[in-house]
Amino acid sequence: MKKRWSLPVLYLGVAAIVVSTVLVLQSPGEEEVAEVTNEFGVRQNDWSALDANGDAQEVNQSAESLIMPVVDPSAAVIHRSFYDQEASAEEQEAALVVVNQTYSPNLGIDIVQEGESFEVVAAMSGTVTVVQEDSFIGNAIEIEHGDGLVTRYQAIEDITVEVGDNVKQGQPLAMAGVSELNTEAGTHLHFEVRKDGIPVNPTSLINE
């Protein structure tokens, strides 16, 4: 009888040791996972993460909407609109640029303000990638905003930013000026928006 029961008892003893060993080995792993989760947990109220010291680290900002690139949008008037393929024939004709008797579609909007110069500001936060001097199109600034979105500001003067500058939405960039490309508008800003290199109507994106 003793020999008959000795083998099962031995198996049970070995099994108990194995189970105990597994539980002991698993415990540190569970504590480590919990610790990492606590260190880098996300606060959903302010879209920030906690570092190891419990300090908030910004991981995502609420997406900006494009604004009119002027200080006072209520005083701005669109002198020439974006050439829209779906617009009426009359609207398309008004959105054509004439240079040396050659007609070209306007790839942005031309903004005036009662014939006076006005401050040009960044329509969105981003990085300045181009600062160009050109009397024909007017001096120009280009800003990249990520996700293939680029804004361009032409016919400007007294530029206050340089290539590589990170600018905030609403930050002054220059003053409206003139260009040989659109002498009819006088002092104005030519403003373009491009998505993945394709011109987009700025007014369709501007947050009123």
Image (cartoon, helix red, strand yellow):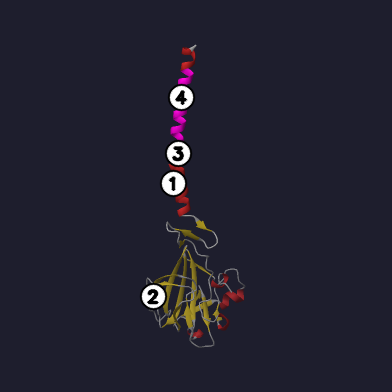
**Residue 200 horizontal/vertical position (percent):** 52, 68
Could you tell which of marks 2 and 1 lies nearer the N-terminus? 1
The quarter in which the C terminus is drawn is bottom right
Which residue shows up at 49% across the image and 15% down it?
5
Could you tell which of marks 2 and 4 lies nearer the N-terminus? 4
- Give the structural element (helix, strand or loop) at label 3: helix
What is the C-alpha distance between the residues marked 2 and 1?
A: 51 Å
Instruction: Kindly identify which residue carries mark 4.
Output: 13
- Give the structural element (helix, strand or loop) at label 1: helix
Instruction: Kindly identify which residue carries mark 2.
Output: 131
How crowded pointer 3 is (Cα within 10 Å; few <14, some 14-19, many 20+) is rated as few
Residue 30 vertical placement versus 183 (above, below): above
Could you tell which of marks 1 and 3 lies nearer the N-terminus? 3
The amino acid sitting under disc 3 is Gln
Instruction: Kindly identify which residue carries mark 3.
Output: 26
- In front here: 43 or 18? 18
Tell me which segment is drawn in magenta.
7-25
What is the C-alpha distance between the residues marked 1 and 4?
A: 30 Å
Q: Identify the main secondary structure in magenta.
A: helix
Judged by depth in the image, the label closer to the viewer, 2 or 1, is: 1
**Residue 32 horizontal/vertical position (percent):** 44, 46
